[in-house]
Image (cartoon, rainbow, N blue to C red):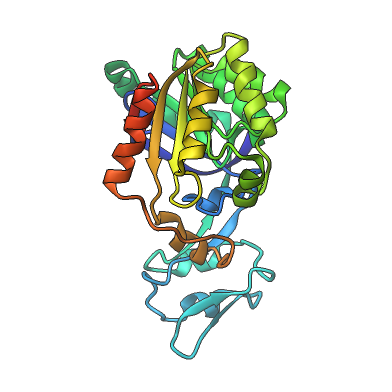
Amino acid sequence: MKGMIFDLKHYAVHDGPGIRVNVFFKGCPLHCLWCHNPEGISKKAELMLMPNRCARCGDCVRTCNYGALSQKSDGEVVADRSKCTLCGDCVKVCQREAIEIVGREVSVEEILNEVEKDRIFFDQSGGGVTLTGGEPLFQPELAEALIDSLHRRGIQVALDTSGYASEEIFLRLARKSDLVLFDLKVMDNTKHREHTGVTNELILKNLKAIDDSSGPPIWVRFPLIPGVNDDQKNLEQMAEFLVELKSVKMINVLPYHKGGVEKFHRLGRDGEFKVYEPPSQERVDSVMNFFRAKGFKVKQGG
């Protein structure tokens, strides 16, 4: 079994308890305007340019046999991605690692070999592996094979998901996981479509379904985006929905940051995102206190 990932991070201390290995699946059915991992949206490998590292030497341009790279008058390298075959020749000649092909096909066994390097940290910290992305449920065969293989080795698995998948796929993989990190963004359906490209009906249905089926514990992850979902109406609607779910053990408030903006530019996808102002710590604390007052355990980050 093989699939596409765009990163694998060792010694991760976010996205679940303890010390973890985070496996970033490539491909996501949502297109959130604030996405901080836009390289995880497309299921295909992509060319990423990093101008801040570039020496503007032109080696990559001269190496490309397909005319996909060129230089502006100031030496900045630009890409015509319609001509790029992702052969990787430009990556090999770049001395400053200013060009990268994001996304690689890997087997379950290759992932397991990387995970095993951190097993001692799992045992000491109560950690494990988090399947994230992107959206792991966008590659359900790889996700399920990996979950099963990790469990055979006695390694706990957290599934980080938007919940946007068929109920059959979602429930099957969520039930197999030891923890579900469920991203919940906007309660209003129209607003959700406007800011993520999809409606939230299936998302809310799946969250209710996994709770009804007495599945694993759930940590709800709430990305706090000023002007999008920080209004009192959305907070009240979210609390009202979640308070009925017995499996929700924590709400992780994730303050927006601008880390994804530069990534969109590096991928040549300017215009596919929106820049917001990060919330003040005072506002973050206020939102966290609101959920605490409703009876939830709350943590910033997670």
User: Quarter of the image holding residue 80?
Assistant: bottom right
Q: How many marks?
A: 0
Which one is in front, 106 or 145?
Answer: 145
Looking at the image, the residue that sits furthest to the top is: 214
Which one is in front, 63 or 280?
Answer: 280
Residue drawn 37% across and 53% down? 278
Up-down relation of residue 45 to residue 92 (above or below): above
Residue drawn 44% across and 58% down? 276
Which one is in front, 194 or 136?
Answer: 194
Question: x, y (%) of residue 38?
Answer: 53, 53
Question: x, y (%) of residue 283?
Answer: 32, 44
Up-down relation of residue 227 to residue 17 (above or below): below
Residue drawn 35% across and 21% down? 297
* Left or right: 129 as drawn, with respect to 18: right
Which quarter shows the C terminus? top left
Camera sees residue 85:
yes
* Left or right: 92 as drawn, with respect to 286: right
Question: x, y (%) of residue 273?
Answer: 54, 60
Up-down relation of residue 222 to residue 119 (above or below): below
Which quarter shows the N terminus? top right
Question: x, y (%) of residue 96?
Answer: 37, 67
Camera sees residue 13:
no
